[in-house]
Image (tube, coloured by chain):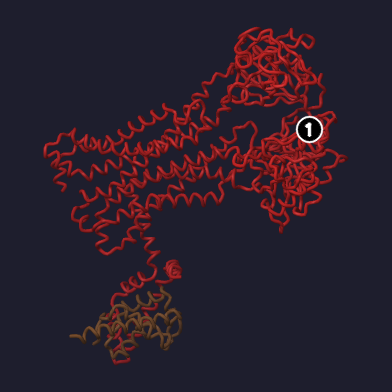
Chain colours: A brown, B red
Amino acid sequence: MGRKNDFLPGTLDMLILKTLSLGSQHGYGIAQHIKQTSDSVLNVEEGSLYPALQRLLVQGFVKAEWRQSETNRRARYYSLTPAGRKQYGLEVSQFEDLIAAIGRVLQTA
Amino acid sequence: MKLFRQLRAFIHRSQFRQEMDEELAFHVEAAERELIDAGMNREAARREARLRFGSRDSVQERVHTESASWFEGLLHDVRYSLRLLRKSPVFTAVIVLSLALGIGANVAIFTVMNAVMLQSVPVRDPQRLVVLNSAVKGGFFPEKYMHDYEGSNFTDEASGLTIGASMPTGVYDTVRTQSKSFDRTFAFVANDEKVNVGLGKRAESGTLQAVSGGYFGGLGVVPALRRMIAESDDDPSASPVVVVAYAFFRNQLGGDPSIVGRTITINDTPAQVIGIAPTDFFGLDPMIAPDFWVPLSLYRAQWERGNNGEEKIDNPFVWWLTVVGRLKPEVSQQQAQAESSVLFGRAIGAPANPTDPTIPSLRITAGSRGLGSLRRSSSSSLWLLIGIAGIVLLVACANVAALMLARATARSRELATRLSLGASRVRLVRQLMTESILLALAGGMIGVAASHFITAMLVRLLNNHSDPIGLVVHVSPKVLLFALAVSVASSVVFGLAPALRATKVEISSALRQGGTQRSGDNRFRSGKALVAGQIALCVLLVVAAGLMLRTLYKLQRVHLGFTAENLSAFTVRPGLNGYGKDKVMHYYEELLRRVTELPGVSSATYSQFGPIGEGWSTSTVYVPGFNTPEKRSEYSRHVVGDRYFETLGIPILLGRALDEQDSASSPCVLVVNETLMRRYFGGQSPIGREVGLGTKQSARQCEVIGVAADVRYARIRDEVPPTIYFPDRQNTFVPDQVSFLVRSSGDRRELARAVEAVARQLDPTVPVVAFREEEAVIARHLSLDRAFARLSSAFGLFGLLLACIGLYGTVSYTVARRSGEIGVRLAMGASRSDILGMVLRDTGRVVLVGLAAGFPVTWICSRLLESRLYGLSPHDSVTLAATFFVLLLVTLVAGAIPARRASKVEPMTALRHE
């Protein structure tokens, strides 16, 4: 079983942006993608996912539209905006800096 | 952008929730399907999917918080504030009402200001209109250019230039035919004229303005009925026509459209009514509201007949026309100025742009707001009122700020709790500001409603001339915007500072001490400062009120020199009907005989100018032993009928009054007033002395036979000038119009009717104009002073009341905060009077600081009132001393009530409260 809510702060947004950079997707699809590609290590809770999506919407990093899903149901598909693409790059580089910094701290021990 | 998306989310709240529902349902369904695919049975899969998802409501709530936070928060703040304000109705009412009055007064004055100062005249495209003015230094035009100036001019104090809008015919013709700046050039006679209007069986009095044929077309006036004056009407050979103003048409002609096409008599000239002007149209000068417009050609003919054809109005020395141009779209005012200056110079025979300022030069001014005479005459009053109303609003704001601060401090524990629970300071400030803005908007709304009445009062105040002014006052969007701006600005003024201070609490100390002890004392200093500020502003208001009241008191007690009680007056103008000198004289004598015989009339007379508020004429006199025939001294000249002094009740101090024995054939005699005797005869009796009068060509010697007591004529405020009274029978010149003065007993309305009847019997084409009771004339003369006294007293009282509320609230609050300390002091053996004294000393300090700040400011500002004052200086010691004691007394009483309550504190109760 994956860990719950154990993300570093801000990483959920980054993971969502990464997922959407591969193509538009609905909420459930995003959660599934993150879960599968992380081999079920990262389990995105619905209670965090949808507020995060809403936050990204308000900030203008993603946009949403209603489309038919593969199961022929109406679903809300999210996709990246140009601003979101830029933000993704920013977050990745910040995250890498953070990881590198943590790594340095751990190696001194 | 972000705010916009939030706003959209906020507006589409319900759709948002629905979509959210659908999206989450899809999510659960998808999860369920996957579980089934993994081999779970349908029921179990559904349960499992739901379980994993958790509470859908809570997810929705959290999504929601992410999106519409700012607007949702605002809505929440508004609801919360309304609840809080409802919980303390007295607090809310005091604040809303004081703001309403402050805002209402400002809105009303701005409404009138807007109408007088900013509003365009009601014509087509007024922005393109310009008026030609002349400017000359030295206060008068050189004789080389001008002999006769019709219309008004004024001296601009800054530049020392005398500026007027009257032009000779030559300038009008030159500009009209040669200017390339204007689409149209038109003109009207600078002076309005009073005329007798014959309407068949009766006659009315009216105001006439003569205009060029292009006037109505140039202004773009659309007639209410039929047509306006056209170019073809303005021709010496055209038949006389007249356009009637809407107000006259409705009020005097009964609104009967069949008047159009009929003939009425303007003075002695029959003219056909060709149309009715639109409702709001008054022309370009709001000081003049004409009843009739006639073509210039008609006016020219009458004028030249009046001058026996000796002088032509079109000669270059008579400046009588106001010239208006409509700028071509591509021409700027500067270009028009440059071009017209050249034409002006050419027309009057002067250099175009003279370097010598005593040579007249041309000034073009924007005509969109009319001629500006009303602006000039009422602007000082309006600015004064704006100032006073502004101070009242400031006092109201300071008062509200003090109350808000006291309350916010009382809520410091709540605010500290919220801060410690993670609410941001911005969030709390917003909450407090929402409250302020709500209060201000409520105050603003009530204020706008109340301003309606104050506006009506102000218009009456401006309208105190006997002639109505053409002023259209209505609440415009601009005014409402102003009200909104004032409301919001005031809420920022009174709300922001307390909000910022109140949220700057040290959480731990506020929580620990329960917000009831010394921790707030420091903060509370600003509350006291606000109250002191209010008191300082009140000094201004109360001193202004005191000065106005004392001025009115003094004006009402000025010795007028005649007895106004039971004295009536009316005017007749038979001379306008073209009657010869003898016929006019006969009319006066016959009317006087018939009026004197009316029941109840004890005495009657007539004179060219009646007392108070009417015109005057001056001339010069040679007094042997005082001056020389070349350097004669000025006097005010009155030509009076028999029994003049008796009728007005003017005492004769020396010699005798003028009477029947002073006829055309007897030697020339006159009566002087006391001031003339004092100034020109060194106080010696002038009886029997001869003085030189008349022009150089026809000098004559007249004997002084009496000295009358001083009488005020033109304005009560003016010093009495040296005055000479002449018997009208010895006068070579018979005035076109006179005022009859009648002393009577009994009902004056009846007298008015009787006068009307005998006048109509005598000559139905001569109307009785403005029958008036002298007492009312005097009252009206002082109406502006009375209005100022009333307004400033009302504002002063209101300010004082607010300051008292502020002080009361602040002291009550301080006392409540210190109840623990007071309890300790009492327990330690302090007497109740010690406590009372302690609180009163504290209050007294605040009051004295306020007074100390207020008086120097008042000392400087009260000078602005100087022009409105009479018989006292702006630093009138009585007013200043009275203000000091009134303010001290009233505020200390307001402070003493809570102080007394403090001294009654039960020590045990106060201490247990800890």
Q: Which quarter of the figure has residue B20?
A: bottom left
Q: Is residue B692 above or below residue B860?
A: above
Q: Residue at x 36, y 60 (%)?
A: B76
Q: How far across and down, in percent of the image, does residue B64 sit?
A: 36, 70
Q: Quadrant of residue B180?
A: bottom right
Q: Is residue B900 above or below residue B80?
A: above
Residue annotated with mark 1: B266
Find numbered disc 1 in the image and state the secondary structure of the residue it sits on. Answer: strand
B83 versus B698 height, above or below: below
Q: Residues within 10 Å of mark 1 (few under 14, many from 20)?
A: many
Q: Amino acid at mark 1?
A: Ile
The residue lying toward the viewer, choosing from A76 and B540, is: B540
Q: Quadrant of residue B646?
A: top right
Number of marks = 1
Rendered location of residue B392, percent (x, y) = 43, 41
Q: Nearer the viewer, residue B849 or B786?
A: B849
Q: Position of residue B826 (x, y in %)?
A: 14, 38
Q: Residue furthest right?
A: B237
Q: Is residue B312 in sight in this rendering?
A: yes
- Residue sitting at 63 percent across and 48 percent down? B120
The answer to whether one can see residue B755 in this image is no
Residue B232 placement, left or right of B367:
right
Q: Name the residue nearer the viewer: B457 or A86.
A: A86
Q: Residue furthest left?
A: B828
Give x and y (percent) for residue B734.
77, 21
- The answer for which chain carries disc 1 is B
